[in-house]
Amino acid sequence: MKINRNQDIDVKPILNSIPGPILVETPVFATVAQQYYEMKCSAFAGRHAEKQALRLQMILEKYCLPSLADIPMTKLKTGDVLQVLKPIWEEKTAVAERVRVTISRIFEMAQALGICQEVSNPAGWSNNLEFFLPQPSAIFQPTYPPAINYRDLPRFFRVSRSLDSTQVRALEVMVLTAARADEVRTALWRDFDIRKRLWTIPASKIRYQRNGWDHMVPIPERVIEILESLPRSETDAVFPGLRGREFLGEHALNNAIKRVHEVDLENGGPGFLDPETGRVATASGMRRAFKAFALEEAGASEHLVKLALSQLDKATVKQSPILVQAVSKRRVLMEQFAKYVFSLDNSSRE
């Protein structure tokens, strides 16, 4: 990432100064930001490492560097940070907080390198920015991905089953297993055991890698039918992408929901909207629909639902490592969910 195109960045003078005093001219913000960026990129891990790097690059290039790049680290003041944050603090609070934390961490790196140790952090919150900006929690309400009411799932599946689309089949697998969209998009045949009706998602594929355990997913009969109907590609991908891509695109499952929504509208139905926001449901929102069904309709425990959604933390896993997967109990829940989802189809056959 070229974050300061007018300056050649050489971090060796900084590194050679540890632990003694700085013997070279104090580096500017862009120099230390470059070093911070390279350090973070080497630390990012998992399948989303590239996205994390791109997000950090965006924060630096779009928000931090335009006004801070050429400021010597020892001269960086709270007013400089406020100049960056104020225009976005209320309209883009979540982004603004990430920007603040990034500036703060860059300053902390500079201090660790022996730079500006006598200066307080200009991006710190306590006893500093809190006097000039409202608390993020006071102005930012987290939003959840749009989801349909779980009671609309039978109607949703009646429409989806009428469509001949790999994207829609992948969507059905996602809903019926309560998996994450990325876990389904990048699913591999070697992770499925059809005989045992089990899908093992490697820990490396699980977002945040919360507990370091592979996630064992009991798969209902309809998922087996879908898998057996799919052609095998030259690769191990269950849902290969178009035009030679290894996997379905990032937005494939959201696009599948939009297609089902449009078909329902064409057939005179109301479509599939989030009742609170009026927006078309999303793939992530389908997990919320499953959770609502499991708690309200099936009477499942919160622990079992968190396990089905792969949301247990490491501490919980350590308490009961042998029973943590609870595959048999979850199989009953997932079969109950599948039976509910296909209730309209089943009633039409009677």
Image: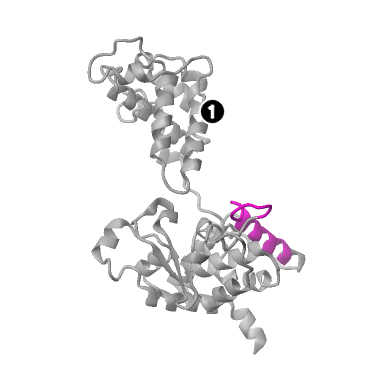
Which kind of residue does numbered mark 1 sit on? Lys
Expressed as whole percent of the image width and height from the top left, the position of residue 233 reads: 62, 63
> What SS does tag 1 mark?
helix
Quarter that holds the C terminus: bottom right
Label 1 packing within 10 angstroms: few (<14), some (14-19), many (20+): few
Residue 287 inside the magenta-drawn segment: no
Q: Nearer the viewer, residue 69 or 141?
A: 69
Residue 251 placement, left or right of 199:
right
List the single residue furthest toward the front. 234
Residue 11: tell me if it is visible.
yes
Establish if 26 lies above or below 343. Answer: above
| Residue at 28 percent of width and 69 percent of height | 322
Q: Nearer the viewer, residue 308 or 124?
A: 308
Establish if 218 lies above or below 136. Answer: below
| Residue at 35 percent of width and 60 percent of height | 213
Residue 250 inside the magenta-drawn segment: yes
Residue 230 placement, left or right of 109:
right
Expressed as whole percent of the image width and height from the top left, the position of residue 269 reads: 71, 68
Q: Quadrant of residue 153?
A: bottom right
| Residue at 36 percent of width and 54 percent of height | 210
Q: Nearer the viewer, residue 251 or 134?
A: 251
Identify the residue under disc 1.
Answer: 62
Provide the residue span drawn in magenta: 242-264
Tag count in the figure?
1
Q: Quadrant of residue 130?
A: top left
Expressed as whole percent of the image width and height from the top left, the position of residue 223 reads: 55, 73
Expressed as whole percent of the image width and height from the top left, the position of residue 135 reads: 39, 36
Residue 86: tell me if it is visible.
no
Q: Quadrant of residue 42?
A: top left
Residue 140 placement, left or right of 158:
left
